[in-house]
């Protein structure tokens, strides 16, 4: 390969690396390992629920107790309208025929939400209480589930909401499991995690990450 070709290739690799860095800039990350047990770390806004850091067999997590029975959430990360991706690991446990509901969100207290609803064996996208899309999903009680939710503005207009979930130990799906095109402009807000402890068992959250995403 001649010097000109080598120079062009080097420039391309630098540009690609720089573009990749810009496309996936980490804006917020919390694994709770340095957080105080019994408290909520700085940078979190609890909307409702007795969230607190707890020890889970030597691993610190954010815990939502199994009572009372309601919908609870906590906000974190930067406030933006779009161009964000949120990811988290969430663990819940069934009790008999009662199941928790687990999820992550974007855009504030009335969020776009990606949730696993084990009682319906489905993975779902919501806006507030409105169901936007769903797909069959098999959830394993007592196992960590990875969630990833993304909202970006489209160059041609509108917005794209995309979500996926997978069991810990499995390979992350290459494609989004759910996608929904949005025409209404999103309201700026923070990322979030959500839990509904309908099984009356604690829900654990860990490895919360918010990254910027380009179009």
Image (cartoon, helix red, strand yellow):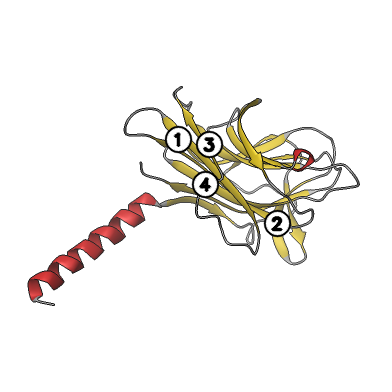
User: Residue 176 — which label?
Assistant: 4
Mark with earlier residue (3, 4): 4
Q: Nearer the viewer, residue 109 or 150?
A: 150
The residue drawn where x is 77% and y is 65% is 57
* Percent x, y of residue 148: 56, 48
Q: Quadrant of residue 17?
A: bottom left
Q: Nearer the viewer, residue 204 or 118?
A: 118
The residue drawn where x is 56% and y is 45% is 177
For mark 3, give the secondary structure. strand
Q: Residues within 10 Å of mark 3 (few under 14, many from 20)?
A: many
Q: Residues within 10 Å of mark 4 (few under 14, many from 20)?
A: some
Give the vertical position of 103 relative to 171 (above or below). Answer: above
- Disc 1, disc 3: CB below 8 Å? no
Mark with earlier residue (1, 4): 1
Give the vertical position of 101 relative to 165 (above or below). Answer: above
Q: Is 183 left, or right, of 58 in this rendering?
A: left
**Can you identify the residue that label 1 sits on?**
160
For mark 1, give the secondary structure. strand
Mark with earlier residue (3, 2): 2
Which quadrant would the C terminus be assigned to in this image? top left
User: Residue 190 — which label?
Assistant: 3
Which of discs 4 and 2 lies nearer the camera? The answer is 4
Q: Quadrant of residue 198?
A: top right
Q: Is 116 left, or right, of 154 in this rendering?
A: right
**Can you identify the residue that label 2 sits on?**
144
Q: Residues within 10 Å of mark 1 (few under 14, many from 20)?
A: some
Mark with earlier residue (1, 3): 1
Q: Residue furthest top?
A: 184
């Amino acid at each position: 390969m001649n010097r000109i070709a080598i120079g062009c290739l080097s420039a391309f690799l630098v540009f690609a690396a720089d573009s990749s860095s810009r496309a996936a800039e980490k804006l917020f990350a919390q694994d709770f390992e340095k957080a105080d047990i019994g408290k909520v770390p700085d940078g979190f806004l609890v909307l409702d629920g007795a969230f607190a850091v707890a020890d889970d067999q030597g691993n610190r997590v954010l815990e939502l107790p199994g009572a009372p029975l309601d919908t609870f959430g906590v906000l974190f990360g930067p406030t933006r309208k779009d161009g964000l991706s949120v990811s988290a690991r969430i663990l819940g446990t069934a009790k008999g025929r009662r199941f928790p509901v687990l999820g992550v969100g974007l855009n504030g207290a009335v969020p776009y939400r990606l949730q696993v609803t084990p009682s319906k064996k489905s993975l779902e996208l919501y806006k507030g209480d409105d169901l936007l899309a769903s797909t069959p999903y098999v959830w394993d009680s007592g196992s960590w589930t990875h969630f990833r939710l993304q909202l970006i503005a489209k160059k041609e207009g509108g917005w794209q909401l995309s979500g996926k979930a997978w069991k810990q130990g499995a390979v992350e799906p290459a494609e989004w499991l759910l996608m929904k095109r949005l025409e209404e402009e999103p309201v700026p807000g923070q990322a979030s995690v959500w839990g509904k402890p309908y099984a009356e068992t604690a829900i654990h959250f860990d490895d919360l990450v918010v990254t910027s995403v380009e179009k």
